[in-house]
Image (spheres, helix red, strand yellow):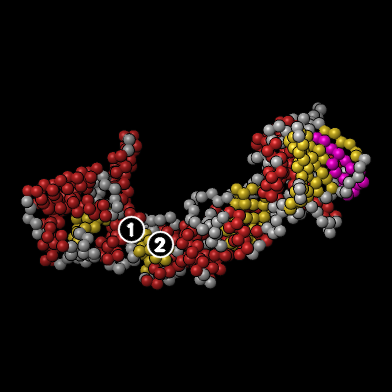
Amino acid sequence: MSDFHFKVNLKGMIDLLSNHLYSTPQVFVRELLQNAVDAITARKQLEPDHDGKVGMEVFTAEEMAPTLYVEDNGVGLTEEEVHRFLAQIGQTSKRSEYETDFIGRFGVGLLSCFIVSEEIVVISRSIKSEETIEWRGRPDGSYQIRKLTQTMSPGTRIYIQSKEGFERYFAPERVQEFARYYGEFLPYPIFFYGEKAIRLTADQAPWEMSSIDALVYGKEKWHVDFIDAIPLHSPLGDAQGIAYILPHSVTVNAKRKHRVYVKQMLLSETVEKILPDWSFFVTCVLNVNHLKPTASREEFYDDALLELVKKELGDCIKRYLRQLAERKSPLLGEIIRVHYSSLKLLALEDDELYALFIDWLPFETSLGTMTMGEIRRLTPTICYTPGVDEFRQISKVAKAQSRCVINGGYMYDLELIEKLGRVFPDTHVERIDSAAFTQGFTELSIEERELAYSFIRLANAVLLPYRCKAEIKKFYPHDLPALYTTSEEGLFLRMAEQTTEEANPLFASIIERVTTNQAGQDYAQLCFNFENEIIQKVIRVQDPELCQLIVETLYVQALLMGHYPLKSQEMSLLNSGLVRFIERGLDA
């Protein structure tokens, strides 16, 4: 049996690179810079005192396409290395014990130049040789090598001439823009030569700045007044960076995009998975040395190391928030005001942080919006409803009684409230059932019950078709004539029935099957307030028709005050009741 070798269609490979691997043709500038920086890094390993630099220039002439020239004073290539590294796809010169010091790893970067050019010319002299080698490669897979008679200092020069349709990528101002975009923070200076030499690299990267200077940089870069800047550090990823706290709220499921560098070369400004999901209230600038980028160098491998680095960076943000809470810094109050949804999620995930700043988090209560700290100082028992609808049923009554009840119906609030007892064992947490809430109302005396007996009997008869029973007690506020309450099961049944009325026949029949076994039960209660002036008059009304009309109207009013959606049956009550009241008024 004979052995055969794969044959690579280089033109097909170039098409793959341009249309699938790289997101934009301009990455050829990044790849040229990457090769230059790696060459200098390799030389510094042999000559630690070597001062590396990269130069760029664009040559233009009439009736000729522009040509980009890139030079470095790095380690250079011998003739054997030219054959091995420039003519073998996937072969890279960085396979050594120092591999982690290099940006490139795949040996395909130089091919990106074929996206914009029909020929790549490389002239190089290795520090290990006196020979100057010229290599010319073409996208059809052919190349030529020759030895030049002229000598040059160790390093490499690359020439690429624009092919038709890509001239805009070779405009001097565009080349400068691309070089700054990708290589602004590279460790060796990059110069663009024109009428005068322009340095394209910055003196300091944001992850090397103090928090104050990083905030200034962030405002100048993105024109945003960030709340604060958090230093980031990951030993596992050998990463440093700055997390900027956004000055505006964002949704919990928002995708936060971050500007990430690999060995100080820009990887992408749209990296999504470098910070934990709960940290969507920050955006970061980060330099990473030990994570592995994909072949396109626009994302990272999604592996176990990435998860560990992500956790370390998240711990930096947690540590920052913990320090603010311990110092009782007003800045934490500002952050919570803007990003309380994010911090609620963070508190759920981390018991230590929960204990530190749960008292700073705001909640809706029957007494208005209050922080948990204010609630805990107000009452030893933390009372709450599990949902918004239950809260709406009783909030007005609870407020009139100066009773603090928390609305647990918003995102994460229920879990945070119920976690109180686990983190603080001395705190008593009580769930309020809206249907049982009326049991705390004051009962009537025997004489009062006798006075209201006929009215309650009639009210029960009127409310029977709506699966609601009547009760009468004394409660605050006195201006509230009636309170409608129902259980969770009853609330589900009410919503199901309303949905059935509005749904198509098929969906309605499915809902009816689900609720069939519950249809004959009473789940709701309409509690009349004996202390209310209107109820005092109604219980003395001798006209049964008028009394029925008032009960129906109070029933619908109680539903509306509880923010319940009205079923068609109850909408008819509302409409007919108004008309009948108008008619009685006109007759009177």
Q: In which quarter of the image is residue 115?
A: top right
State the image coordinates of residue 568 (x, y, percent, origin top left): 24, 42
Q: Which residue is located at x 25 percent, y 52 percent?
A: 559
- In percent of width and height, residue 220 lies at 60, 57
Cα distance between the residues tagged 1 and 2: 12 Å
Tell me the chief SS of the magenta region: strand
Q: Does the magenta stretch include residue 136?
A: yes
Mark number for residue 212?
A: none
Residue that carries the numbered disc 2 in the rendered image: 363
Residue 436 higher or lower than 3, as above or below = below
Image side of residue 252 versus residue 112, left or right: left
Q: Which residue is denoted by mark 1 in the rendering?
A: 391
- Tag 1: amino acid: Phe
Q: Position of residue 487 (x, y in %)?
A: 30, 54
Q: What element carries label 2?
A: strand
* Residue at x-position 76% and y-position 44%: 57
Tell me which segment is drawn in magenta: 123-137
In reply to whether residue 179 is colored magenta, the answer given is no
Which callout, 1 or 2, points to the residue nearer the camera? 2
x 76%, y 54%: residue: 188
Q: How crowded is mark 2: few (under 14 residues within 10 Å), some or many (20 or more)?
A: some
Look at the picture and state if 128 lies above or below 245. Answer: above
Q: In which quarter of the image is the N terminus?
A: top right
Residue 177 x/y as whole percent: 68, 47
Disc 2 residue type (three-letter) = Phe
Other residues around mark 1 within 10 Å, as few (<14) / some (14–19) / many (≥20) = many
